[in-house]
Amino acid sequence: MNTAVAQKVQVPDIAAQVTYAMRIMGVSPIPRNYELFYEAYIGSNPKLTRELAALGSKASQEELDEIGGQYFGHHHGATAIDGAHTRIAGELEGLLRLLKQEQTSLESYNKLLDETFVRINGKSTTSVDIIKSVIGVLTEATGDTINQGKEMVQNVAQKSIEMDIVRKELDEYKRIANTDSLTQLSNRRAFDDRLSAIYNSTMSRNVTALILADIDHFKKINDTYGHPVGDKILASVGSLIRANVRKDILVARTGGEEFAMIVEGNTEEEAMAIAERIRIALEHTPFKNSKTGVNYGPITISLGFCMASWAEGPGELYSKADIALYCAKNGGRNRTMPFEDGMKKDFSKSWLIYRK
């Protein structure tokens, strides 16, 4: 059981470095530009990083938005979302208008019933002419009300269908916004949301683990075979991880060649078994070009994990899992290590260890 308080880890200020890069390039400090540069900085999408670098120091907003629209359709495509919002507002307004019309129709029908009741009480109930007149009026009014009701039902049903279509469009925008374009896994945004939610409840912390994984020697792969091959390997590794865990486990690509899994409902031993299953499966997976015969392997992965109960919050949980991953790398790679008290991470060397 890890009870000791971990030493405070000094984390590099990525935000400051991203802001500095934007400033020296003369890029407007607006949210969509910041996300573009942040994703390029952490290396979550090598193609994005290369395209952004190719713009040089005089990138126009139009050029930045074009790249952003390609990789981040969730907000660079804000026009589509705004359009969907406008359509929903329009459908709701139309629905309210229909309901008000129905209310007016029912109020008129009730008024007619009241007037008819007064007429019947004011005359002899044996008068055949009065009864016939009342029946005629009520029949006509009831028929009109029924027809209006049927039309109302049809209109409301149509509005519901149209609103459901827009809702599905918005769900798709949200899915795209939370998906890594290269691996089709969850992205850093979706991961951060789920990570922070772990500490909303104290009940599940003892059976929740954060597993971080990093492909070994990935820089060498990119340098030797090129980024297109590296991208294919990233996608393949992501698919392999996804295939070796339960559907309810969130699997995300959090940057460059790093992946993360949030495992809920499992003990420390079971989290270790899940991580080892992934490591062994990848170790025995061939990476060979079927056309050229070039063998890119072996491809291995290092993993570190921490139980949520060993940390006070999401930031500390991530730091401890990252330290465990660092120790797995520093200990020889191609291994899984849980966080243990006393583990330390030398940030002055971590960049080289992760990328050699």
Image (spheres, rainbow, N blue to C red):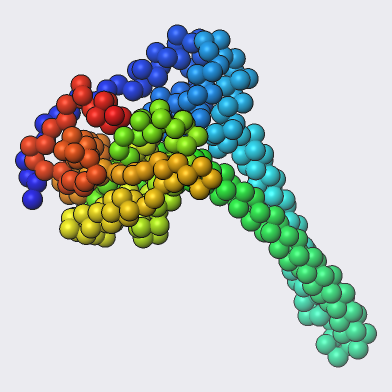
Q: Residue furthest front?
A: 293
Q: Quadrant of residue 243?
A: bottom left
- Residue 284 versus residue 339 in the image, above or below: below
Asked if residue 321 lies left or right of residue 163, the reply is left
Is residue 159 in view? yes
Q: Which residue lies furthest to the bottom in this view?
A: 126
Front residue of 182 and 282: 282
Front in this rendered view, residue 298 or 86: 298
List x then y, in percent, for residue 23. 45, 11
154 up-or-down from 87: above or below: below
- Image coordinates for residue 315, horizontal then vertical, percent: 25, 36
Q: Which residue is painted at 37% across and 37% down in the image? A: 257
Q: Position of residue 188 (x, y in %)?
A: 40, 38
Q: The C terminus appears in which quarter of the rendering?
A: top left
Q: Please say if 268 is above or below 355.
A: below
Residue drawn at x 36%, y 30% is 219
Q: What is the tally of numbered marks visible in this picture?
A: 0
Viewer-nearest residue: 294 or 132: 294
Residue 113, quarter of picture: bottom right
Q: Which of 122 and 86 is in front in this view?
A: 86
Q: Residue at x 36, y 58 (%)?
A: 244
**Residue 299: % across, % down:** 34, 43
Name the residue rendered at 24%, 44% in the picture: 334
Residue 202 shows up from this direction: no
> Does residue 350 sit above or below 235 in this rendering?
above
Location of residue 108 (image quadrant):
bottom right
